Amino acid sequence: MRSCRDISTLVSQGLDKKLSLRERFTIWLHVMMCTRCRNFQKQTQFIRKAARHYIDDL
Amino acid sequence: MTETVSAEKNLSAQRPILFRYALLQLRDRELADDAVQETLLAALQSASDFEGKAGLRTWLIGILKHKIADHWRRSAREPSVPEFTQADEDDADTGQDEFFMSTGHWNGGPKAWADPEAALKQLEFWTIYETCQNNLPPKMAKVFMLRELVGLEADEVCREAGLSEANYWVIMHRARLRLRECLDIRWFNNTKQEKHHA
């Protein structure tokens, strides 16, 4: 069982490189049960979107 | 002839990223556009140099940096944003960890955000966003911006910022944790202040 620290690290890496099937599966299993990691996943995706809006409106 | 055409095509495909890079430093769309145009022109003039196009973008950014430096020299003004080349030693803070307990569980941890999409349309949100982004330690901010604002790939950011890959993962993870927390406290779960419904 991976910790939330490990999972959020993987989630973050997933925004910067293609994860292996195993890694994606590990995340998927974890976020099904863990609301906070699920929130982290959604919110970091949102931050990416916000960052792009920010520079486009600069 | 066809070679020149494909060279131009390759170059113009890099234009959006170059533009965002220049914009971030010059903070002026027109100036950024000029710098990118000069860069692309200079690149075309030495088109034979970029045959191995693997490092094309790195090479172009190298040229662009010179154009930006030229601009600051001409205008005899200080850069409005710190130069990307500045170093700092905030890597020290990767040692202790306020986000996780020693067990690896969240310390607090991300609460839900109500309707984040709506925030994108609110002017006050962007002030908060900017504050949070500026609150990142300088090197972390630089890495984050190169990746998320400019849109460079991770390996390009490493080259730009002189980072090992392992360092990169740590810094980006922390940048996201920090930014997320800052937005959470100042906006999404900010109970102190009324902000919704502009």
Image (cartoon, coloured by chain):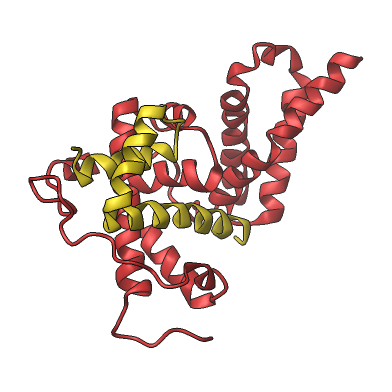
Q: In the rendered image, is residue B87 in sight?
A: no
**Image quadrant in which you'd find residue B35:** top right
Asked if A11 appears above or below B179 in the picture, the reply is above
Position of residue B125 measured from the top left corner of the image (x, y, whole percent): 47, 73
Position of residue B165 measured from the top left corner of the image (x, y, whole percent): 34, 26
What residue lies at 46% left-to-right and 84% top-to-bottom? Answer: B196
Q: Nearer the viewer, residue B88 or B196?
A: B196
**Image quadrant in which you'd find residue B44:** top right
Question: Total of numbered circles in the picture?
Answer: 0
Q: Is residue A40 rendered to the left or right of residue B70?
A: left
Farthest residue to the right: give it: B1
What residue lies at 60% left-to-right and 23% top-to-bottom? Answer: B59
Q: Quadrant of the N terminus of chain B?
A: top right
Q: In the rendered image, is residue B150 in sight?
A: yes
What residue lies at 79% left-to-right and 21% top-to-bottom? Answer: B7
Q: Nearer the viewer, residue B16 or B59?
A: B16
Shade representing chain A: yellow
Position of residue B152 measured from the top left corner of the image (x, y, whole percent): 53, 36
Q: Is residue B70 rendered to the left or right of residue A7?
A: right
Q: Which chain is red?
A: B
Q: Nearer the viewer, residue B179 or B127?
A: B179
What residue lies at 38% left-to-right and 48% top-to-bottom? Answer: B141
Asked if A24 appears above or below B183 in the picture, the reply is above
Position of residue A22 measured from the top left corner of the image (x, y, whole percent): 36, 28
Asked if B23 appears above or below B155 in the picture, the reply is below
Q: Nearer the viewer, residue B24 or B73?
A: B24
